[in-house]
Image (cartoon, grey):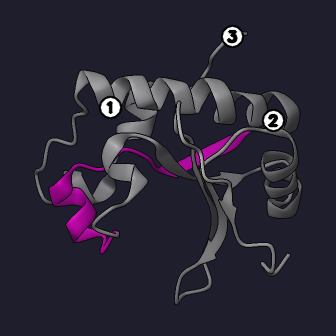
Amino acid sequence: MNLNFTITELCHSDKAIEHGIKNIPSLAECDNLLNLIYFVLQPCRNKFGAIKVTSGFRNKEVNKLVNGAVNSNHLTGCACDIIPLNSTFKQVYDYITQILDYDECYIETNSKGVRWLHVAFRIKGNRFKHNPNYLA
C-alpha cells in the first residue's frame, strides 16, 4: 500500500507556530503516527479520496493551548482530526466504525459549528469508542 500522508502533515499546528512551540514527536510517537496512517487514514483516503488533517500529534504545551484532554490520544501520536473533502462525515465514520480497527471515532463540533472527525488507533488495546448518536 502506498502511503501519501506524512509525519509533517500530522504534526502541523497553527497554534504551535503562533506561540513559537516546536511540536516534534519522539520516535515512539512517530511509530504511533505511522500506525494511524497505515491502519486508518490511508485506507480512508484510498476509499474516499481527499482528506484534510486539521490536528494530529500535539505535545503537552500545544495540547494545553487547544484545551485538549489531559489524557488525549493526540499526545501519543495515536489520534488526529480530519475533514473528508470528497465524501460525508457519515460515510467516513461508518467505514471506520464498521470496517476498520480503531480506538476512538467521533464526529465532533465546536461552538462555532465547525465539524471534524476525531479518529484514534492503538497498535494494541483498541477500545472501539464511538458516538453512535452523532448528527449526520
Q: Nearer the viewer, mark 2 or mark 3?
A: 3
Residue 21 lies left or right of residue 94; in this view the side is left
Residue marked by disc 3: 2
Residue marked by disc 1: 29
Q: Residue furthest bottom?
A: 111
Of 107 and 126, the residue lying toward us: 126
- Region rendered in magenta: 50-68
Q: Is residue 38 above or below residue 105?
A: above
Q: Residue furthest front?
A: 125
Q: Position of residue 67 (x, y in %)?
A: 30, 75
- Give the distance between the C-alpha atoms of the residues marked 3 and 1, in whole angstroms: 21 Å
Q: Per the image, is 8 magenta?
A: no
**Mark sitting earlier along the chain (1/2):** 1
Instruction: Indicate the secondary structure of the residue bearing disc 3.
Output: loop
Near mark 2 (Cα within 10 A), the count class, few <14, some 14-19 or many ≥20, is few
**Mark sitting earlier along the chain (2/3):** 3
Of 19 and 132, the residue lying toward us: 132
Residue 130 lies left or right of residue 54; in this view the side is right
Near mark 3 (Cα within 10 A), the count class, few <14, some 14-19 or many ≥20, is few
Quadrant of residue 70 within the rendered picture: bottom left
* Residue 49 tag number: 2
Residue 4 lies left or right of residue 7; in this view the side is right
Of 80 and 52, the residue lying toward us: 80
Write the residue at 79% across / 56% down: 93
- Give the distance between the C-alpha atoms of the residues marked 1 and 2, in whole angstroms: 26 Å
